[in-house]
Image (cartoon, grey):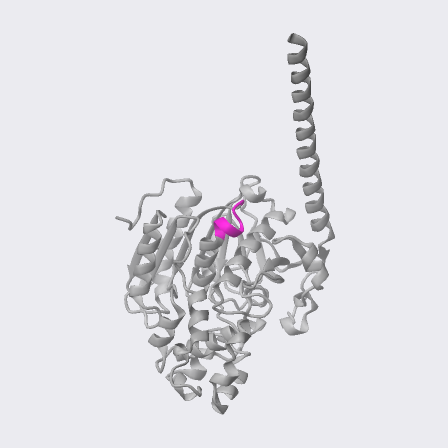
Amino acid sequence: MQEHTKRQATRHTASTLRRWMGAALISLGTAFAAQSVLAAAQAWPPLASPVAKPGDDAFYTAPSDAELQAARPGDVLRHREMSAKAYYLFPVKGQAWQLMYRSTDHNGRPVAAVTAVLLPSSAPASNRKLYVYNAAYDALTLNCAPSYQIAKGTALEQALVQSGLNKGWVTVVPDYEGLESLWTVGRNSGQAVLDAIRAAERFQPLGLSGAATPAVLTGYSGGSIASTWANELYRSYAPELNIVGVAAGGVPVDMGNVARKVDGKLFAGLYMGAVSALARAYPEVGVDALTNDEGKAMLVKIRDMCAGQFLGGNPDVVGSFAFKKMARYTSVPDILAVPAVQQVVDLNRLGQRKPGAPTYLYNGLFDQVMPINDVKGLVDTYCQHGVPTTFRQVLGEHITSIFFGFQGAFDYLEARLAGKAVGRGSCK
């Protein structure tokens, strides 16, 4: 009997050792593969001045399909240093890079995206924190992408990016729309943000602690699309990350309701731009059959525009189409009533998934773009999911509310990075 027990114990020990050795080999292989991918990432020459437009810059050209297929989401594919003094009003003391990394689009296909990463000289030697700022670049062209605008020194939200740098936080500013400029496409944007975090954590010069790095996300208007979608996709797409808080303002919860609110008014161009971007992302909608000759001409004209990027000399979608009605451009009475369009709107509606991190939302009392009841409904939905959610209304309309609301959002994120307890917020 004792001999039998000894043999069983020996077999158990041998089996346990084999499992440990197998796990160790797998871990070693995974680590080696990760190091190999990072080592293979191309180091391009530092960004020259004057800065070439992305269309004339080979850095922004996507790698081959084979290279994308071989990489993991978040792997750095190429990188180059750029001037850390790119901000003409707020010079950054430290280092800055552009990273091209592998992400996944809204159809599940591997794609490339670019992000700017900034390392302030005040960053601590260890236990660094990550601040992800999603700019509202609302673009149909890479000419308005943050990684390019930062290099040029014409990024409109640079003071808000600077807030994180002043705290010594490593800062990530992603081109979350991707190389195809898929503005308003929620899943594409959210996954691009999560993969930008992965890329930053794998980029050794930033000195981060890998996936354990505490990270916070923020963005306003178009940037809130990227921030809130990243939060809703966080647990399913990148559960290894350590996102401790998300703050967003001027959130477009339902694109259809936003379109109805702005149609024929000052911000009508946002409706036109969203139609163009969604038609690019969902060609199956068949937008050509839904537009008249003037609409087809509008879609050609708008494809190289963005919203509010006048500092870079780009044509502005808001100024170009202010007070225009969508019915002027369509061959159907109401494009939003078309079933294929309704399906796309449904796919890009927030609130269909439980957010992964505590959330802070704010909106202007006099916002001419975002329907306030949609935002309040999103807060209620997040609370019902059991996610601590804070909601604040600020005194302002759509443009000024980013400035009136940002400090409260930033204070919230700073508290999350400090490890302070988060209450129920606005949840009853």
Q: Is residue 42 visible?
A: yes
Asked whether residue 350 is drawn in magenta, I would say no
Q: Quadrant of residue 336?
A: bottom left
Which residue is drawn at the image coordinates 55% and 70% (left, top)?
A: 181
Q: Residue furthest bottom?
A: 293
Q: Is residue 403 above or below residue 308?
A: above
Q: Is residue 193 above or below residue 139?
A: above
Magenta stretch: give its range.
Answer: 234-240
Specify whether 341 is left or right of 87. Answer: left
Q: Residue furthest left?
A: 428
Name the one closer to the observer, 427 or 2. Answer: 2
Q: Position of residue 340 (x, y in %)?
A: 46, 74
Q: Position of residue 212 (x, y in %)?
A: 54, 41
**Quadrant in which the N terminus appears:** top right
Q: Is residue 98 visible?
A: no
Q: Position of residue 312 (x, y in %)?
A: 54, 74
Which residue is drawn at the image coordinates 71% and 45% (left, top)?
A: 33
